[in-house]
Image (tube, grey):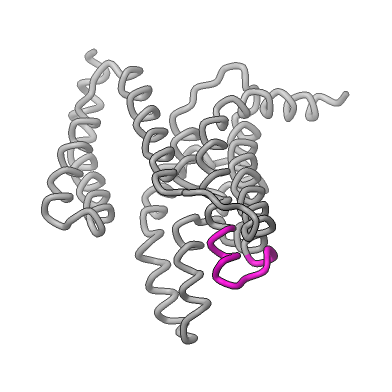
Amino acid sequence: MSTERQRRRKALRAAFPYTIPIFAGFWFLGMTYGVYMNVSGFSFWYPMLMSLTIFAGSMEFVAVNLLLGAFNPFQALAMMLMINARHLFYGISMLDKYRGMGLKKIYLIFGLCDEGFSINYTADVPGAGDRGWFMFFVTLLNQLYWVSGATLGGIFGSLIQFNTEGLEFVMVAMFVVIFLEQFLKEKRHESAYVGLGLSLLCLIAFGRDDFIIPAMLAILGVLTLLRKPLEKGGEAA
């Protein structure tokens, strides 16, 4: 077996356990999306191809109404930017980590999602070998979970009868666990407190439907201003 193939296998084995919690959320939500497309009158090809080419869960749900409504590309573009604007901040955070990734970078940029970002940005896996392949397989596995769930939901949507209310809480719980894990790893927690405090203020000021982008802008601005003091404090600690 070639050295490169061994590195890929090692990275895949290291990445898989990190994606198991995401599998639980993505598979159920993906199936919910597939069922939703089915009951809206679309063949299973639609959720399968859309999950392959869009891979943005929230936007895919919204796209159902866009497909059923009047053709309005400008409205679709504006809605897509509003829903997925947070990925601009994810991308900025991943600039250094994606450097030198070669062609893998193209797929990593396309497949960047909330859950993949949380793992690839924070995970410290000495046994993964090549970090580039580790991030690649985290992204690939996440998309496979979503695509398979959406496809199965689209195929069996008319046959499955169950109450999916509350399934989205799986993703919320996963993010809480990831945050707590990262919080416990750090010796100093100023950045975490800044993020929580500004998010709470923006939630109060803008409401739960519109607070994410203002919160991210505020966190980015404040942490940029406090970068040097925080770095000095970290070195002192």
Return the residue found at the far top. Answer: 237
> Residue 88 location in percent, x, y?
39, 55
Q: Residue at x 65, y 34 (%)?
A: 133
The one nearer the camera, 59 or 124, is 59
Return the residue found at the far right. Answer: 1
Q: Is residue 36 magenta?
A: yes
Note whether residue 52 is visible.
Answer: no
> Residue 156 location in percent, x, y?
67, 55
Question: In the figure, 54 relative to 116: above or below?
Answer: below
> Residue 63 location in percent, x, y?
49, 69
Note whether residue 133 is visible.
Answer: yes
Region in magenta? 35-46
Q: Residue at x 59, y 25 (%)?
A: 17
| Left or right, residue 56 beside residue 42 | left
In terms of image quadrants, where is residue 26?
top right
In terms of image quadrants, where is residue 230?
top left
Q: Is residue 41 magenta?
A: yes
- Quadrant where the N terminus is found in the figure: top right
In terms of image quadrants, where is residue 24?
top right
Q: Residue at x 39, y 66 (%)?
A: 81
Question: In the figure, 16 relative to 97: above or below?
Answer: above
Q: Residue at x 24, y 20 (%)?
A: 188
Question: In the figure, 38 relative to 56: above or below?
Answer: below
- Quadrant where the C terminus is found in the figure: top left
How many numbered discs?
0
> Residue 22 location in percent, x, y?
52, 36
| Left or right, residue 104 beside residue 209 | right
The one nearer the camera, 99 or 142, is 142
| Left or right, residue 198 beside residue 3 | left
